[in-house]
Image: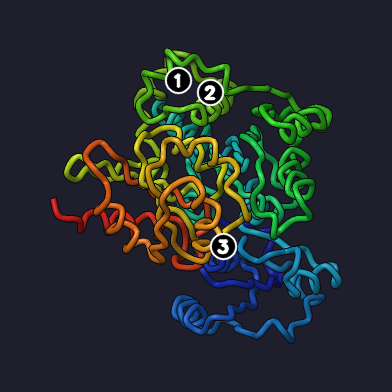
Amino acid sequence: MLSAPALSGKRFAVYGLARSGLSALRFLQRSGAVAVAWDEAPAARDKALAEFPGLDLQDFAGLDLAGVDGLIVSPGVPLNRHPLAARARDAGTPILGDMELWQQARATLPLHRLVGITGTNGKSTTTTLIHHLLEAAGVTARLGGNIGLPVLDAEPLAAGGVYVVELSSYQIDLAQTLACDVAVYTNLTPDHLDRYDGMAGYAASKARLFAMQQPGAHAVIATDDDYTRAAAAALPAGIGLVEVHAADVDPAAQAHWPALQGPHNAQNVACAVAAVRILGLSDAAIEAGLRSFPGLPHRMEVVRSVRGVRYVNDSKATNPTSVAPALQAFDHVHWILGGQAKTAELDACLPHLAHVKAAYVIGEAAPLFEGILQPFLPVTNAGTLALAVQSAAASAAAGDTVLLSPACASFDQFSDYEARGRAFRDAVEALPQ
């Protein structure tokens, strides 16, 4: 398993003991480092103690951060307003995440390449597609980062392998030296603005991915918006730029890729194809991989049809811009949306409401979205996802589509978008034929 001998004897503070925190503790233990840990939830602390008997658990409210070599936090900790982050900065203590710890161990790995993918929308599909194209062509690859197995828990690849990692802005914020051989940037639209000083701060976070690259590396940037164009214009010296556009993809060719339909997927394909060409794949291998790509769970995933009504799980669409392609893709839509709103608008969705027969709003954002949509179409304030599915099923007719595309984070009612998507699947599976 992966370890970093250079960390032996160093002391780290690990805040947050969910999946990424436990993964970090395992890595530190293998590396010979010393860890003090804390989580505000007693159940999380109990789980950590069960795996690490004797773990030094201390409430970080009284911890001297000047006495540790690094503070390791989960990506969910808001660095812009959490008091622990401010204390670490005052103490001069580096704030790190799991991807930076992995970077610390890279020198011990067999020769490999790292592809990092970021952007507001499309990064999960682009990451998964790059991984699929490589493996379909016979290249050993590992999926990780913000998707799949925690990168610190993965077995190292043999020489010649490619690590393909999805990187949220939060993960980039927690990296200091993460150097991608190929860095991919899909797009930037309003999102996570509670964590940044407006769009400029959000864009600056994404741009740090390129600032950490080394001369000779490559950047693949879909320069279809002002923010990505600015990032391309400001690349550090020595980084090779490949600009791509959604319009580069021929719609006639796209028709042969069943899981990659729609203009948003044209941009995802353009990014992925450019990345794997840099890695040496042939056009023939790329075409075969595009045709065989199975798609991404929770992203425009057809769950089943019941009495002629199609049910689609698009739980991964957590902001209005990412919902818009789904609304364009279907006619006669019964749209389930809501949760924890990231923005107080649905502007990107409004031009496509002609596709929507009715809306069913849930969660914290239900009153907000009900007010936005009522002037245009019938809206049911269902409150919960289960009730929304039942209401939509009662109203939908053969040929209609019931679409969960929330335009929101899930954390008001679910642990993550995957749990929300599974709950939708379960509710749909429970419908009588």
Q: Residue at x 49, y 47 (%)?
A: 317
- Residue 89 at x, y percent in the picture: 83, 67
Q: Nearer the viewer, mark 3 or mark 1?
A: 1
Q: Which of the two discs, 3 and 2, labels the residue nearer the N terminus?
A: 3
Q: CA distance from mark 1 to mark 2?
A: 7 Å
Front residue of this view, candidates 80 and 363: 363
Please report contact status of discs 1 and 2: CB closer than 8 Å, yes or no.
yes
69 lies above or below 39: above
Label 3 sits on what residue type? Phe
Q: CA distance from mark 3 to mark 2?
A: 33 Å
Label 2 sits on what residue type? Val
Q: Residue at x 54, y 41 (%)?
A: 350
Residue to which mark 1 is pinned:
286
Residue to which mark 3 is pinned:
27
Q: Residues within 10 Å of mark 3 (few under 14, many from 20)?
A: many
Q: Residues within 10 Å of mark 1 (few under 14, many from 20)?
A: many
307 lies above or below 96: above
- Residue 404 at x, y percent in the picture: 39, 50
For the view shown, which residue lies furthest in the left direction? Answer: 433
78 lies above or below 193: below
Label 1 sits on what residue type? Ile
Q: CA distance from mark 3 to mark 1?
A: 35 Å
Q: Residues within 10 Å of mark 2 (few under 14, many from 20)?
A: many
Q: Which of the two discs, 3 and 1, labels the residue nearer the N terminus?
A: 3
